[in-house]
Image: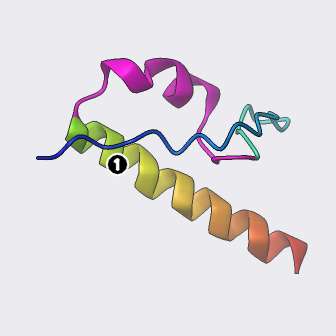
Amino acid sequence: MADVASPCVRNCCLDENDICLGCFRSLSEIVAWNELDAGERKAVLDLAEKRRRENLAKRS
């Protein structure tokens, strides 16, 4: 499996649940990123995308 790039957009700001409002990863996911294999990174990206969609839905 190909390497999975970090979704970091250099807009780090954590909400009250320690979720980054730039990439929507949790603080623990961000800290662990370099230790994760490609499959684990893909799983994190899937969760982050779900959080992003939920965040957008709350704002509309």
Residue at x 88%, y 72% (from the top left corner): 59
Quadrant of the rendered structure where residue 28 is? top right
How many numbered marks are there?
1
Secondary structure under tag 1 reads helix
Point out the stretch of residues depicted in magenta.
22-37
Q: Assign the C terminus to one quadrant of the image.
A: bottom right
Residue at x 54%, y 27% (from the top left corner): 30
Q: Is residue 15 left or right of residue 31?
A: right
Q: Is residue 52 above or below residue 11?
A: below
Quadrant of the rendered structure where residue 32 is? top left
Quadrant of the rendered structure where residue 54 is? bottom right
Percent coordinates x, y for residue 17 in the rendering: 76, 36
Type of the residue with mark 1: Ala
Percent coordinates x, y for residue 34 in the rendering: 38, 20
- In reply to whether residue 26 is colored magenta, the answer given is yes
Residue at x 76%, y 46% (from the top left corner): 21
Q: Is residue 56 above or below residue 28?
A: below
Name the residue at the bottom extreme. Answer: 60
Q: Is residue 58 above or below residue 9?
A: below
According to the image, what is the colour scheme of the structure?
rainbow
Name the residue at the left extreme. Answer: 1
Percent coordinates x, y for residue 49 in the rendering: 54, 61
Label 1: how many Cα within 10 Å (few below 14, some 14–19, many 20+): few
* Front in this rendered view, residue 23 or 57: 23
Disc 1 target residue: 43
- In reply to whether residue 35 is colored magenta, the answer given is yes
Percent coordinates x, y for residue 13 in the rendering: 82, 35
Q: Is residue 57 left or right of residue 52?
A: right
